[in-house]
Amino acid sequence: MKTINIKTLLIIIGFGTLQSGFAQELITPQQAIELTLSNNYGIKISNQSVELAENNTSLLNTGFLPTLSANAGTTFNIDNTEVEFSDGRVTTLNGAESSRYNAGLNLNYTLFDGFGRSYNYKRLKEQYNLSELQARETIENTIIQLFTVYYDVAKFSENLDAQNETLLISKDRLTRSEYQFEYGQNTKLVVLNAQVDINNDSISIINTKQQLNNTKRNLAFILGSSSNDFDVSTAFILNELLDKSALLEKTKTKNIALLQVEKNIDINELTIKANRSGYLPTVGLVGTYGWSKNNNNAASFAASSTNTGLSGGINLSWNLFDGGTTITQVKNAKINLETQKLQKEQLLLDIERNFNNAWDDYINKLLIYKVQSENIDTAKSNFERTEEKFKIGQVNSIEFRQAQLNLLNAEVLKTQAKYDAKLSELVVLQLSGELLNTGF
């Protein structure tokens, strides 16, 4: 029964390996970025916010245009009227009908409001610029998230390849052990150990495939896709020529969080100026064109009358004291401005600290990758020599298995170190505002 179970498991693993060997769509890093920018829902939502901010900067939302309104109405009266004339005659009317019709156009235009409209318009433009910075931050964070998952897919893909190679070696060892057992060169225990190792290798492959599939689904979600039938590229270049001093200076001028704080300072300075407009008078232009018609009852001297006319004028209003509302608004805006300036100083210290931490992490990850690359050469050499000795009986199966596992672990650690180094590089570029200007 054990042999049947192992063979069944090998068939499942072999079938899965065959399936994974079929050609799938290869998504390169650049294609992944393009798909994310086009399909990612977080980025789409941030773009909607930019469109809203752009609409708010339209001339139609500034208050610089006049307002024009139309009105019309009619009234009907039924009256009981008694009229006494100067000559003593008395006229009584019951149910006397009269009606009135009117229509008009009203124009209002603010000529001067203490420059409030001008500052509000400039503030709306700055808020639009802020929304673009916020959208850029969303894009940068999404790209970091994208490559965190993208490199996980690449890592599990490489690990799966290494585990498949390990399984092939284990299967060859089992075949060799069975032949040796048949010819009396080893015991049944050696064969059973080889079978157990194949079992363990097969289970590792199953687990890695599950991790790979789960990670592919995560990547498909970021790409805005429902299909995970794709492969990713495992080839990329680590940039070991980054200039720390140059990137640190860019961090102090191009970091996305810093740019947003600076934009908020600009907005608040305009808010102070807009609030101060409450100290000044408002001058407005008004104009009206009207028409009215009256149909009078029989008691009136005129049966009907029609009037049309145009009127216009200038009005001035000056809120000499509004209970202190304007004064309070200006004071609060000044406090907010000082708070934002303090936040900027704090942020400068914070991002410099974060940059130095990220830089050290980047250098360490590069060093670890170099060490792991050298380590895998040693592990390969050790395994090849152990394999040769195993074939001629100078090394037992336990020593051979240990060399095999050492090689597999070295390959896994090298793969992990490679992608860790690349991600740490991207974090450094993000902090310095250069993430969107780099090649992937």
Image (cartoon, rainbow, N blue to C red):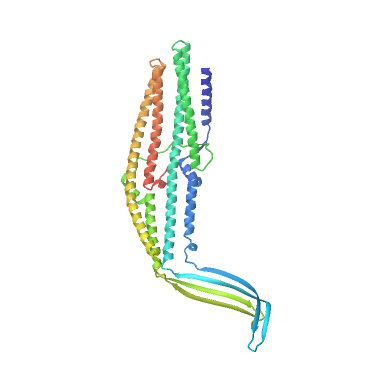
- Please tell me which residue lies in front, 334 or 220: 334
Does residue 199 sit above or below 413 in this rendering? above
Residue 58 is situated, as x and y percent measured from the top left of the image, at: 48, 61
- Please tell me which residue lies in front, 382 or 287: 287
Please name the residue shown 45% across and 33% down the image: 156
Residue 263 is situated, as x and y percent measured from the top left of the image, at: 39, 55
Horizontally, is 134 left or right of 24 in the view? left
Specify the quadrant of the image occupied by residue 148: top left
Q: Name, please, the residue furthest toward the bottom.
A: 87
Could you tell me which quadrant the C terminus lies in?
top left
Residue 104 is situated, as x and y percent measured from the top left of the image, at: 57, 72
Residue 297 is situated, as x and y percent measured from the top left of the image, at: 66, 79
Specify the quadrant of the image occupied by residue 363: top left
Does residue 184 sit above or below 292 in this rendering? above
Q: Is residue 231 visible?
A: no
Q: Name, please, the residue furthest toward the top.
A: 184
- Tally of numbered discs: 0
Q: Is residue 166 visible?
A: yes
Please name the residue shown 47% across and 14% down the image: 179
